[in-house]
Image (cartoon, grey):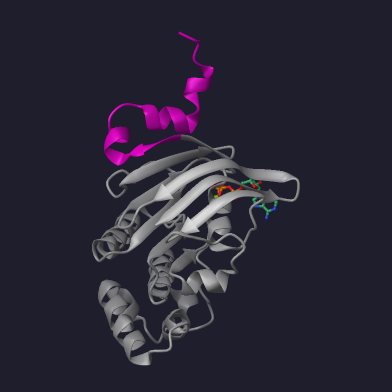
Amino acid sequence: MLDIRQLFAGYGRLTALKGIDLEVAKGEIVFVVGPNGAGKSTLLKTIGGLIMPSAGSIEFHGKTIVGQVPEKNCLSGLALIPEGRHIFRTLTVEENLALGGMIHKDKRAVRSDLEHVLDIFPILRHRYKGVAGHLSGGEQQQLAIARAILQRPSLLMIDEPSLGLAPLVIDQVYESLRKLNAEGLTLLVVEQSTARILDLADRVYVFRNGHVILHGSAAELAGGHALEEAYFGYAEHQPQA
Ligand SMILES: Nc1ncnc2c1ncn2[C@@H]1O[C@H](COP(=O)(O)OP(=O)(O)OP(=O)(O)O)[C@@H](O)[C@H]1O
Ligand SMILES: [Mg+2]
């Protein structure tokens, strides 16, 4: 579904992605993890069309999307929830959700999608007329996901959904992602921490300093210490065997 080859991107003279190869197949949940400044957010912004890559290719459903504006990406089934969620805090839950469905003309379908997301996130039904800025962090994350779902994406990219949330709330958010995936949504999720992701992930990429330094299936990475070593860079300090 998503096929990225030798992707380079950055900010002016700073190169944040240094030759990334990454794939997401239909139906997968793929995680990208790595420490601060590894390039994770830059990857999502580049795929979403907010940053123009300096080299490499990005194909979505077999078509190149390099240079395509974010609105066009959205219409072709790509949704991005950026770092910090970006909900409209002064608008109500209802108004935030209405913005999600705006790109679709079939209002009856939008209405039924809305009922569906309110079933998945009952708290949003409960707080429907309330101001989004008054929701808790976990509820705001659910609102951001719900709004993105109303765009009817085939691939949803989320930047650090667990940021600032208590462990129990992270479990709830991850459970909703699991449900959406079971309904056919493909997910590309960025997290800083490797904790908790292996239950949900099909595959994991570890980024450091603009490079993929490890990737594999969750099953391959679950045993052993490869993930921790890659993440924390212990391997670098080990003497050569
Ligand atoms: N708007 C920007 N302008 C200039 N440099 C930036 C900008 N955003 C990020 N960078 C730099 O690009 C590199 C990659 O940043 P990026 O935000 O992709 O990292 P990240 O993996 O998402 O980190 P974090 O876990 O802290 O969110 C870093 O060196 C960062 O300082
Ligand atoms: Mg980031």
Q: Kindly give the residue lying farthest to the right in the view shown.
A: 13
Q: Is residue 220 magenta?
A: yes
Residue 200 highlighted magenta (yes or no): no
The residue at the point 38 percent across, 74 percent down is 152
Q: How many marks?
A: 0
Quarter of the image where one finds residue 187: bottom left
Q: Position of residue 138 (x, y in %)?
A: 39, 64
Q: Is residue 191 left or right of residue 52?
A: left
Foreground of the two, 97 or 133? 97
Picture coordinates of residue 12, whole percent (x, y) = 75, 50
Q: Is residue 216 above or below residue 88?
A: above
- Name the image quarter holding residue 70: bottom right
Is residue 162 in view from this perspective?
no
Is residue 24 or residue 56 the one in the foreground? 56
Is residue 63 something one can see in this rendering? yes
Residue 33 versus residue 147 in the image, above or below: above
Instruction: Name the quarter where the C terminus is drawn.
Output: top left
Q: Residue furthest front?
A: 62
Quadrant housing the N terminus: bottom left
**In x, y percent, where is residue 173?**
33, 60
Q: Is residue 88 above or below residue 18?
A: below
Kindly identify the residue that appears in the image at 40 percent across and 68 percent down.
145
Residue found at the far top of this picture: 241
Q: In x, y percent, where is residue 10?
A: 67, 49
Left/right placement of residue 154 relative to residue 223 reads right
What span is in magenta?
A: 214-241
Question: Foreground residue, 129 or 148?
Answer: 148
